[in-house]
Amino acid sequence: MKKRTLIALVIAGTVVVAVGAAAFAGPYIYRDYLVAPAAAEPTLPASASASAAAGPLSSEDVQGDWTVGDGSYAGYRVNEVLNDVDTTVTGRTDKVTGSLTVADATLTAARIEVDVASIATDSGSRDSYFRGTAMRAAKFPTATFALTAPVKSSRMPVTGQPQKVSATGDLTLAGVTRSVNVELDAVFDGERGQVVGRIPITFADFGVDAPDLGFVKVEDAGFVEFSLTLEKN
């Protein structure tokens, strides 16, 4: 075999191996190096229980109108799939507004609005698809949650002690409304309330096509996540 032919075969073999390695390693490189780490799931701050001396609250302490304040955020969590390798992606915005009403230790009304067009990830192309093709934010600029049934805790809140409650409401995404149930973690630190939760959703239920970026697809289900700081009016 001529030396030139041998060299050509070696080069060709090297290219084949390199392409195969890239095909295998590409999804992991995308997940581990090209996509920003997913944000942590919303949880109550570890300092919540230590921020104030624990003590029982009266209905007067919590009743009245509350507003979503600074420090709140909302967004989504989905898995992108490239060659069967999952990559978790989170989008976030702090443009969240809303109000809640408490009467006789019962949450009687709540409405939360999120500015969809401001939800951002680490990728401009992903965000453009999400805001435009998927969510049609120009036509439907906000996503909303409206409470549809009163929420009464099994016990009065205690300052600094987290509590779990369940809520039912209407979630509206891209102009489509669906009834959802959400498990909430809440705590009152003596001055402000903190509520966190996540709502599992299937995109098709809201008339949304799961984003498809060509080389990577998004699974057809994910989560709406939020962390709300509540201030009494």
Image (cartoon, rainbow, N blue to C red):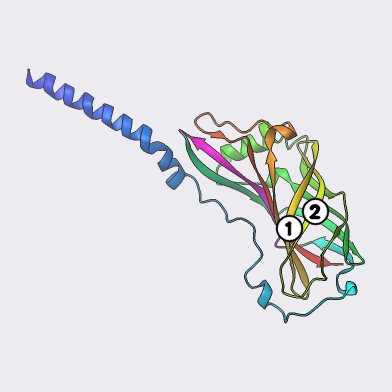
Please state which amino acid type lies under the numbered disc 2: Ala
Q: Which residue is mark 2?
A: 167
Horizontally, is 225 left or right of 181 in the view?
Answer: left
The image shows residue 193 at horizontal and vertical percentages of 77, 67
The image shows residue 86 at horizontal and vertical percentages of 50, 41
Mark 2 neighbour density, 10 Å: few (under 14) some (14–19) many (20 or more)? some
106 w.r.t. 148: above or below: below
Q: Closest to the observer: 36 or 180?
A: 180
Q: Which residue is mark 1?
A: 184
Q: Is residue 188 magenta?
A: no
Horizontally, is 136 left or right of 57 in the view?
Answer: left
Q: Quadrant of residue 39?
A: bottom right
48 w.r.t. 69: above or below: below
212 w.r.t. 152: above or below: above
Q: Is residue 78 magenta?
A: yes
Viewport quadrant of the N terminus: top left
Give the SS element for disc 1. Answer: strand
Q: Closest to the observer: 233 or 171?
A: 171
Q: Is residue 227 visible?
A: no
Q: Check the image and name the residue furthest to the front.
A: 154
Q: Is residue 224 visible?
A: yes
The image shows residue 215 at horizontal and vertical percentages of 49, 30
The stretch in magenta equals 70-83
Please state which amino acid type lies under the numbered disc 1: Leu
Horizontally, is 76 left or right of 206 in the view?
Answer: left
